[in-house]
Amino acid sequence: MDRPGLADFLRRRREALAPSDVGLPPGARRRTSGLRREEVASLSGMSSDYYARMEQQRGPQPSEQMLAAIARGLRLTLDERDHLFRLAGHTAPRRSRRTEHVSPALLRVLDRLDDSPAMVLSDLGDTLAENRLAVALLGDHSAFTGLDRSAFYRWFTDPAERARYPERDHARQSSIQAAGLRAAISVGGGESRATEIVTRLRAESPEFREVWERHEVRTRFDDHKTLIHPELGEIEVDCQALFTENQAQTLLVLTASPGTEGYEKLQLLSVLGTQQFSA
């Protein structure tokens, strides 16, 4: 572990970022350029003290999971992420089409979306990043682990996932989910996790087996859908999707036309966020 090199790299990458680069307001006058340590810590999901120790060449060797979070918080490129891992004494993650490292380009757009629910998804349906309105509308997906991280898997195994959609749309959504999973495997190959999702679903869900046998393939998201919020009820939204060049990650943005009931409900969500709604 190269403590001086790690500390210097973290400090210089932090100082190279402006608050607007990560969706933060400028705030009060800053004595130095770049982000504050506590801001990077918050973006990376760790304590300010833990992050400060690394910049001060103190503390334990960070884990690979912690380094991945820091790379995301500092909006590092893949080359910069790999350098970070090596400075911390770890082998850089193997590069593949599917990666937990969110595209910096998609993150830059996500950081600027503070009035619409938006999230970055992998081609296997994992939520890699989401803004506060996406959490308010769809719930916090960061707590999912294992196969449950995949929306494809949850759709056929978790009733809570289906509760987000009107029952009248369930059959259509089942078709879309299975077709999206097949498209991901077709484009990205049947690596172990993708294969495990299909194997487990075929064993656990008769509905999935029936839909899977249709051999439908689809990469597009719905242009229009109805979602159910536990307090606000049905919300009609339009979906815009921005793909990375290799289509391994997608930025999905949900909007509603001004003047519609869906628009008014999203406006209410933007004000109240994840607070409890009164009856």
Image: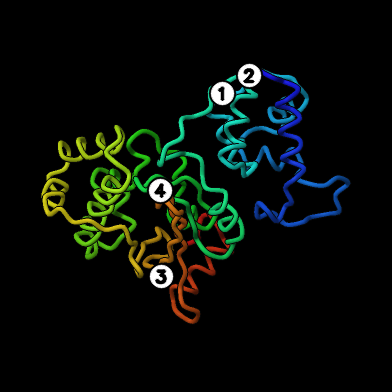
Whole-angstrom CA distance, mark 2 to mark 1, is 6 Å
Q: Nearer the viewer, mark 3 or mark 1?
A: 1
Residue labelled with disc 3: 238
- Cα distance in 3D space between marks 2 and 3: 45 Å
Q: CA distance from mark 4 to mark 1?
A: 25 Å
What kind of residue is marked 4?
Ala
Residue 176, picture quadrant:
bottom left
The answer to whether marks 2 and 1 mark residues whose Cβ atoms lie closer than 8 Å is: yes
Q: Residue at x 61, y 60 (%)?
A: 112
Badge 2 or badge 3: first in the primary sequence: 2
Question: Going from the N terminus, do you reach mark 3 or mark 1 first?
Answer: 1
**Whole-percent x and y of residue 138?**
43, 54
**Total number of numbered discs in the rendering:** 4
Going from the N terminus, do you reach mark 2 or mark 4 first? 2
Q: Toward the viewer: 136 or 104?
A: 104
Image point (47%, 45%), residue name: 128
Residue identifier under label 4? 248
Q: Amino acid at mark 3?
A: Asp
Residue hosting label 1: 63
Where is residue 26? Give x, y as percent. 77, 56
Task: Say which label, 4 or 1, has the lower sequence index.
Answer: 1
Q: Earlier in the sequence, mark 4 or mark 3?
A: 3
201 left or right of 6 in image: left
In this picture the colour scheme is rainbow
